[in-house]
Amino acid sequence: MSVTIAFATQLEQLIPCTMKLPERQPEFFFYYSLLGNDVTNEPFNDLINPNFEPERASVRIRSSIEILRVYLALQSKLQIHLCCGDQSLGSTEVPLTGLLKKGSTEINQRPVTVEGAFILDPPNRAKQKLAPIPVELAPTVGVSVALQREGIDAQSLIELKTQNEHELQHSKKRVLTPIKEKTLTGPKSPSMSPVPPQNPSPSTKDDVTGSEVESLQYDKDTKPNPKAISSSAPASAVQPVPASHASETASGQKIAVPATSHHFCFSIDLRSIHDLEVGFPINCILRYSYPFFGSAAPIMTNPPVEVRKNMEVFLPQSYCAFDFATLPHQLQDTFLRIPLLVELWHKDKMSKDLLLGIARIQLSNVLSSEKTRFLGSGGEQCWRQTYSACVPFITAQGSNNRIMDLSYTVTLEDYGLVKMREILVSDSSQGLAAVQQKPSSVPPAPCPSEVQTEPRETLEYKAALELEMWKEMQEDIFENQLKQKELAHMQALAEEWKKRDRERESLVKKKVAEYTVLEGKLQKTLIDLEKREQQLVLAESEVQRERKELKLERERNLQERQDSIRRAREDCVHQVELERLKMRQLDEDKLRLQQQLTDAENKYKILEKEFVQFKDQQSNKPEIRLQSEINLLTLEKVELERKLESATKSKLHYKQQWGRALKELARLKQREQESQMARLKKQQEELEQMRLRYLAAEEKDTVKTERQELLDIRNELNRLRQQEQKQDQDSRETASGKMDSPRGNTLEGGLDDYLTRLLEERDTLMRTGVYSHEDRIVSDLDRQIREVLAKNSASNE
């Protein structure tokens, strides 16, 4: 298992404005823990352009695939930190669950990898309340995690990585860079035990061979990288050269590109999809590949997005740029002949991915668009062409029906001719070494045996001349060295100044971005204030208008109330006059009615006297008395008839009640008789059981008594035999007679007791009143009594 940290970009975004860095040049490094081993890469000083050699940390593991899959499921993420000293500036998590999928046997054929650019998040982003960073400015780190079964060679690993080149978010370039390798020891556990390498050295770093130097690296500003420009011809792949030392690996890579080739950068931005025609929602991703750009690996949007009808969806991670070198006419010919095919895939967790449709993007349209001029990083003149359009997705199978539309933007940038110094990497260390070589030749000593006549021909003169020449040469060499050191110092100062300038520019850009956000918020607040001011002006005008309306309404109501009061006063005066007239009329009517009442009372008195006289006259006649008696008798008759009828009805009712009562009484008697019979039967059964128990007890006592008597008799016989052995036959007969008489008396006594018990039992049953002499139990008792009496009489005789 190996972990490679290849590159990093936009790391300055992790430095907050309030953080104070050390006064000395700070050192930054990446840290992670691999199977219990703490791993750090080589420190670097520049966050804006981090320049560090990719390093691979590897560990050998002894385990089974299932146990390793369970371990990776438990330890599902590898956490990588960017540190400055003992402080973590940001971290990211690399998922490891995709290495060993359940049911997959890919590890047995080829190595499995998880690689890509992962975004670094500052610690406690939620607590610091930091604003979200745009995707193009997000700090990222390129990480590759590979798991390889022992026995699979490194070439298969290179082929797998070549087939599965990861899609990068912006204009990222693929570079062949030497990788330093670290060999680590694994955890000591029974399920996963590391296999020590042949040369175990956990802290040593070895340069890998040319077949292992593949890595992905970002280029920050999408500028042409002399090591990153690949040939446009599909067959001209970059071949890495083995390196013997880390300092010489940069000089072993060469890319053959024609001198007339131009450096191009082509970017594709799949912006959005809209106008869905199918009737169901689609969980889709887009996928395309264009080998002419130097990579046959597919580029995909991620994560999948859900699209519904009447909905426009912007695609995540849909921007990608390619840097390549080719001839202009070859670029034009390829764009005219080969369109870019964008595939629409439906992602479904329950089933396989489904290819829904294909969109054809004609890349030659960008060649006919307007050219705009801009300056490159080195001040050279460059050209840019941009084209935006919409194309439909057509069903992949069956009829050519439209599924939805795709909005896209393509941009072609021409940086001019490719310069040789950007392609061929020279070995600058050799030239420096040649300059720094010092001659070690020393003038030879003069030979004393030689004699010269001319002063210029003497050995002393020659030695002095050579010494002066040697001094001049040394002075020249020293001056050259001083100039080189001065040039090196000036270059270092210039680099430091550029670095500081870039840092200041980065901070200025960051501040400008923050100020832009604050300016936007301020503009929004000003707009809100203007809106509120307009609303207040409108509200004030509305209040003034309503105040005027209320004043007019109040005046109108006051006038109406005054008019109503005046009318009410006039009505009241008129009503009072009318009431007075009515009062006078009522007084006159009252006097008239009082007079009529007096006359009526007088008439009533006269009529009452006449009625009394008439009544007295009528009461003295006999017919009147008889008629009154007849009326009284008639009333009595009617009353008696009514009472007779009610009595008849009550009699009939009582007769019915009496019949029902008799029936109920008969039913109750029958029920009582049945219950009495059941109770008697139950009592008979209980008495029968008691009698049987009693008889059994009596029989038991009798048998016990007889046994005791027999035992006593036997003892007596034995005693008599011992005492009267010498007695004669008469004595034995007498003894036998004595023996029979007690037994007879005993039997007579037992019969009397049994007879007495039977008599008491019969009398007890008869006294209950339930049994009579005809009952079976009583007749059985009588029979037993007669038998006992018969036996008793027979025994007496």
Image (spheres, grey):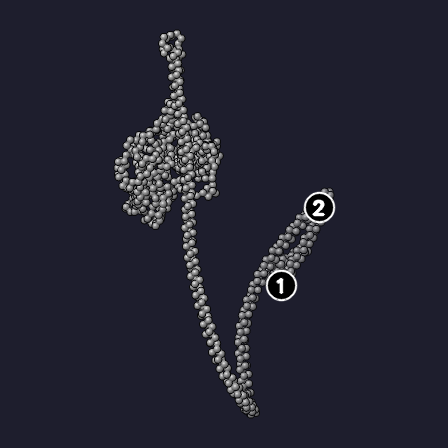
Q: Quadrant of residue 606?
A: bottom right
Image disc number at residue 769: 1
Return the residue at label 2. Answer: 716
Question: Residue 621: where, in percent of width, then height?
Answer: 55, 92
Q: Quadrant of residue 547?
A: bottom left
Q: Earlier in the sequence, mark 1 or mark 2?
A: 2
Figure check: 261 above or below 465: below
Q: Nearer the viewer, residue 443 or 758?
A: 443
Quarter of the picture containing the N terminus is top left
Residue positioned 26% across, 39% down in the render = 336
Q: Quadrant of residue 177?
A: top left
Residue 405 visible in image: yes
Question: Residue 583: where, in percent of width, then height?
Answer: 50, 82
Pair 1/2: label in front: 1
Residue 437 visible in image: no
Figure check: 229 above or below 358: above
- Amino acid found under the numbered disc labelled 2: Glu
Residue positioned 30% across, 42% down in the render = 387
Q: Is residue 760 left or right of residue 155?
A: right
